[in-house]
Structures are given as structure tokens and as C-alpha cells.
Image (cartoon, rainbow, N blue to C red):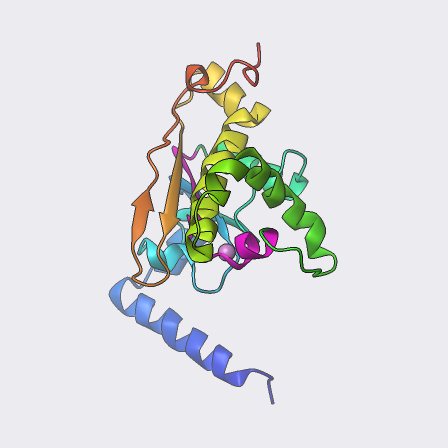
């Protein structure tokens, strides 16, 4: 008897349902993937990339971690970005946060959580940049949600500052980096209007002479 049998049963039904509308779907997909988008999102179970944007397998390349962070030296995230940009040649990188993010909330508190506190330090750095603006709000939920938005904006900048994205722009590759946020309470996305499409959109401090 297989453990978690219901998951295997559901998987079988799901694959059959897709084959009913397109019998060759999986065979075609097994030969190549050609996604146009890289999604960098939160691990939160309520924010599943493919479902939110109603995309099929093969359409979106995905990296998720706690609070959708792009840390300068995180080889996991950087490897995903490099593969997506250099090999898959995605046209869009989307950093998508969400309101009510547990990682953001934890970063605003002083409670101890163990190992993850080291990860949350990066969010505390973002808080530190905008502390005055955030602390001006009296409502805690508003403070959390503002930091959720500002964190996305910072992570978009972090994506743009990577040598990977700057090299792609220098070589003339078409690539846009977007910052979005998702409302877990109504299922809708909001564009934070920080779309960045070229090396002259980023700060001079971070611009590399490649
Ligand atoms: Co989250």
C-alpha cells in the first residue's frame, strides 16, 4: 500500500484530464520547455504560481522561498535566474509578493524562530531602509502590508543588479523585470509599477561596466 495514496490517485486523474483535451500534451512537453516567464514568489501554500496566473505546465519557470527574497549570494536563486535568462531566454522576470506574508510579519517582530531568523535578517534590512515611513503607520497590518510591497520593490532591484541580468541587457537581450503583489483575500494581482527593462533604469551605484 502506497503512502499518501490519495495524492497519487488525484495525480492520475489530473494527467488523464489533460490528455483528454490534448492527447500529446505530455509527450510534446517532455521534449522541450519554452517558458516566457520566470516567477520568483513566496513559498506560502496560498500563492501557487501556475494557478494564480492560470498557466499550464511548461509556461512558467518558478523559484519560491520565504518572502520571495533575491539575496545577492543565494546560489540557489541566482542559478535559477541564470538558467532562466541565459538558457531558457525568458522575456519576463516577475517578483511576486503577497499581502499578509508570514515572513514579513516575523521580520517586524523580535520573536526568536531559530535558523530562519538568519533569513529574516535580509527582510529586516529592507525594513531598516524604510523604517521611518513604515513606523509612521499606526496599524500593524498596514505596516506589514507596506513592507510586503517595499520588499518586492527591493527584490526587483536585486534581480536587476545581478551580473546575469545586466549582462543580458548589455548584449541586447529583451528582458523586463516586474514587481507584483497578490491579495490572498481575493485572488487578485496588483502591479507595483516598477517594471525595469534596461541598464539605464538602475542606479548608477549598481550599474556595471561590462
Ligand atoms: Co509569504
Residue 89 to residue 210: above or below? below
Q: Position of residue 3 (x, y in %)?
A: 60, 84
- Residue lying furthest top: 209
Instruction: Please state, as top left, top right, bottom left or bottom right, where the C terminus lies in the image.
Output: top right
The answer to whether residue 126 is above or below residue 27 is above
Of residues 18 and 91, the one nearer the viewer is 91
Instruction: Answer with the quarter of the image where residue 70 lies.
Output: top right
The x, y position of residue 174, in whole percent, is 38, 24
Q: Is residue 84 visible?
A: no
Q: From this view, report whether residue 200 is shown above or below residue 45.
A: above
Between residue 187 and residue 162, name the one nearer to us: 187
Rendered view: 103 above or below 14: above
Magenta residue check for 96: yes
Q: Position of residue 66 (x, y in %)?
A: 57, 53
Using the image as rendered, state which of residue 25 and residue 156 is in the foreground.
156
Q: How many marks?
A: 0
Q: Is residue 85 magenta?
A: no
Query: Which residue sits furthest bottom?
Result: 1
Furthest residue in direction right, as rendered = 114
Quadrant of the snapshot with the N terminus: bottom right
Q: Residue at x 52, y 32 (%)?
A: 159
- Give the magenta range: 90-107
> Residue visible at 54% across and 32% down?
158
Given residues 144 and 193, the one toward you in this image is 144
- In the image, taking residue 206 as reference, residue 61 lies left or right, namely left
Name the residue: 25% across, 65% down: 21
Residue drawn at (48%, 15%) of the image: 170
Q: Position of residue 6 (x, y in %)?
A: 48, 83
Q: Looking at the image, can residue 122 be seen?
A: yes
Amino acid at each position: 500500500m502506497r503512502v499518501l495514496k490519495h495524492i497519487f490517485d488525484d495525480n492520475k486523474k489530473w494527467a488523464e484530464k489533460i490528455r483528454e483535451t490534448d492527447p500529446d500534451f505530455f509527450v510534446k512537453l517532455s521534449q522541450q520547455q519554452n517558458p516566457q516567464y520566470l516567477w520568483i514568489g513566496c513559498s506560502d501554500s496560498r500563492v501557487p504560481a501556475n494557478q494564480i496566473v492560470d498557466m499550464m505546465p511548461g509556461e512558467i519557470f518558478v523559484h519560491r522561498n520565504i518572502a520571495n527574497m533575491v539575496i545577492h549570494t543565494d546560489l540557489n536563486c541566482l542559478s535559477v535566474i541564470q538558467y532562466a535568462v541565459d538558457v531558457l531566454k525568458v522575456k519576463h522576470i516577475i517578483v511576486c509578493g503577497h499581502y499578509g506574508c508570514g515572513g514579513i510579519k516575523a521580520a517586524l517582530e523580535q520573536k526568536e524562530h531559530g535558523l530562519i531568523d538568519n533569513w529574516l535578517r535580509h527582510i529586516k534590512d529592507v525594513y531598516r531602509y524604510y523604517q521611518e515611513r513604515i513606523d509612521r503607520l499606526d496599524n500593524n497590518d498596514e505596516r506589514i502590508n507596506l513592507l510586503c510591497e517595499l520588499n518586492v520593490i527591493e527584490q526587483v532591484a536585486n534581480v536587476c543588479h545581478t551580473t546575469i541580468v545586466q549582462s543580458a541587457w548589455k548584449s541586447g537581450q529583451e528582458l523586463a523585470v516586474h514587481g507584483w503583489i497578490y491579495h490572498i483575500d481575493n485572488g487578485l494581482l496588483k502591479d507595483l509599477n516598477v517594471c525595469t527593462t534596461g541598464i539605464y533604469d538602475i542606479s548608477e551605484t549598481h550599474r556595471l561596466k561590462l
